[in-house]
Image (tube, grey):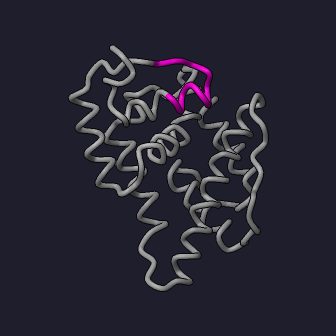
Amino acid sequence: MSMSSVHPLKQAYNQYVHETYGSRIRSDDNPERTEAVAQKVHRLGISYDEYVELACILYDGWARSQGWKYPYWNAVSSDNAIARIAELLKTSNGADSEEDKQQDDIYELELRHAVNYMNWYARSDRVKPTRYFVKDEEVIIRVAAHICSIYNINYTSSNYNDIAKQLARITHG
């Protein structure tokens, strides 16, 4: 199957896995299922690239705990993944005023930074993520609490190192 016949959502996944994990995937074994997933992603209101990045970030630690080199397609395209991302988007959307929209943008940037940081903490082969925006302690607290709720961790600190240690204990026993 040529790359041009692969659904754009699966292409986004294949490219992300290649760029992030160094593995090449070229096919789409079930294009009908991929199209069904793509329709659900479309309803989330984000691009395929954004969806794939968020899903892979969310499932990176779990995939490694399973002994996988990267989050497999069935995990990142599952209904559970879509629901988790919908929940993430719900907490960062819904702004009414321009100030609220700016706060949501800051929250989203911080959430991406935090998840990247957690992945960096767990994997020494990656470059430590850089925060390219001003730290906002209130937003950091909200993000930390949200990450703890996603992974069912007791929120005790907004320190990302503390949360990453707890995640490591969960995913690596």
Q: Nearer the viewer, residue 35 or 93?
A: 35
User: In the image, is residue 163 above or below residue 53?
Assistant: below
Picture coordinates of residue 142, whole percent (x, y): 60, 67
Residue drawn at x 28%, y 47% as measured from the top left? 40
Picture coordinates of residue 29, whole percent (x, y): 30, 18
- Label count reads 0
Asked whether 18 falls inside the magenta stretch, the response is yes
User: In the image, is residue 166 above or below residue 101?
Assistant: above
Q: Nearer the viewer, residue 82 or 62?
A: 82
User: In the image, is residue 106 above or below residue 82?
Assistant: below
Asked whether 47 falls inside the magenta stretch, the response is no
- Residue 72 visible, this orientation: yes
Residue drawn at x 45%, y 78% as measured from the top left? 95
For residue 111, side relative to residue 3 (left or right): right
Picture coordinates of residue 6, whole percent (x, y): 34, 25
For residue 132, side relative to residue 91 (left or right): right
For residue 113, side relative to residue 161 (left or right): left
| Quarter of the image where one finds residue 69 | top right
Quadrant including the C terminus: top right
Quadrant including the N terminus: top left
Q: Which residues are magenta?
A: 15-25
Residue drawn at x 37%, y 36% as measured from the top left? 9
User: In the image, is residue 25 above or below residue 47?
Assistant: above
Residue drawn at x 45%, y 25% as measured from the top left? 72
Q: Nearer the viewer, residue 136 or 65?
A: 136
Residue located farthest toward the front when viewing the structure as drawn? 4
| Quarter of the image where one finds residue 77 | top left
Picture coordinates of residue 82, whole percent (x, y): 36, 46
Predominant SS along the magenta part? helix
| Quarter of the image where one finds residue 96 | bottom left
- Residue 67 visible, this orientation: no
